Image: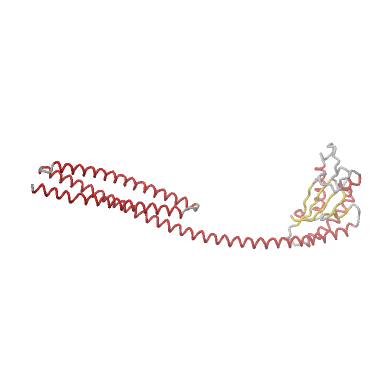
Amino acid sequence: MALSRRSRERGIDYWPGFVDALSTLLLVFTFLVAVFMLGQFFIGREIAGKEDVVQRLTRQLSELSDLLSLERSAKAEAEQRLVGLSATLQQEKSERERLAGIAATAGSNQQQLSALNQQILDEKTAAQRALEQVSLLNQQINALRQQLQALEGALGQAEAREKDAQTRISDLGSRLNVALAQRVQELNRYRSDFFGRLRGVLGSRPDMRIVGDRFVFESEIFFGSGGADLTGPGIAELDKLAETLRGLEREIPPDIAWIARIDGHTDKRPLSGAGQFKDNWELSAARAISVVRNLISQGISPHRLVAAGFGESAPIDFGDSPEALARNRRLELKITER
């Protein structure tokens, strides 16, 4: 009887302590998991908005989430084990009350208690491993924070460099605009001087005149009707023009990108299509090319000459009289930028 009484007293002493230890362990584990989840939330907010780095951090957080899921599974298994242990303890308590007077079952109950103790030790070992994993996760979180701080510093430096570059670009753009404006003014000065010389060389003929920034020649000076071959009087006039252009080419600095553009124009009467040219486009372009080739043969650099044909698309007189049609059949010389 004394042995039975001592056995009951030992049972009453051990089990509450075991249950309290397990409850405390679960509370600590739950707290650690909650701390981990809060840490993950704040880390998620810190890394939001990053571009390439955000993707890498998102993958790492995904791995952390997987680890957390494993820990939650371990917690669920621990809770299930605790429920099983509680049920087992309840069964053992009932068994002990039922077999209180049977001394032969004391040894068996002792073995069961030893087995339960071993299970509790196993649970403690599992909890310790969980704590170690949580510690590892905290270290990874700290490393991610350091990476974020480094990225923020790098982004700040990049923004400062970009701002400095924008300032330099703006300054260069302003300087370039000023330089271009100076070049345009210089080219306009040379163009005005050229037109003045050309007017003096060619004289005050009514079939040669200045219209705006262009020197206009009526086609009859250079070509026969419907043709693009230069005639004798036209070649003589081109000699004067070439001499003036050569002087201009010598005077204008090489760094000014200028060209002399020869534009061919016709009147609005269509060609028959049976001759050398199918339409006015071909005729106007061929006349401009003939003039350019003649100027090149007289020493003008081909890099300074452009030929263009406009056909009847750009008249200067919209009348139908022979005089209006004659004014529209013309060649135009324009000094402009490349």
Expressed as whole percent of the image width and height from the top left, the position of residue 189 reads 79, 62
Position of residue 304 measured from the top left corner of the image (x, y, whole percent): 76, 55
Please indicate whether residue 110 sits to the left or right of residue 203 in the image.
left
Indicate whether 161 appears above or below 96.
Answer: below
What's the residue at 29%, 45% (across, down)? 79
- Residue ranking furthest to the left: 1
Foreground residue among 203 and 166: 166
Q: Residue 18 vs residue 151: left or right?
A: left
Q: Position of residue 100 (x, y in %)?
A: 12, 43
Q: How many marks?
A: 0
Q: Quadrant of residue 312?
A: top right
| Nearer to the camera, 29 or 124 | 29
The quadrant holding residue 190 is: bottom right
Rendered image coloring scheme? secondary structure
Quadrant (top left, top right, bottom left, bottom right) of the C terminus: bottom right
* Residue at the image point whose x is 21% and y is 50% from the top: 16
- In the image, is 166 to the left or to the right of 299? left
Q: Position of residue 56 (x, y in %)?
A: 45, 51
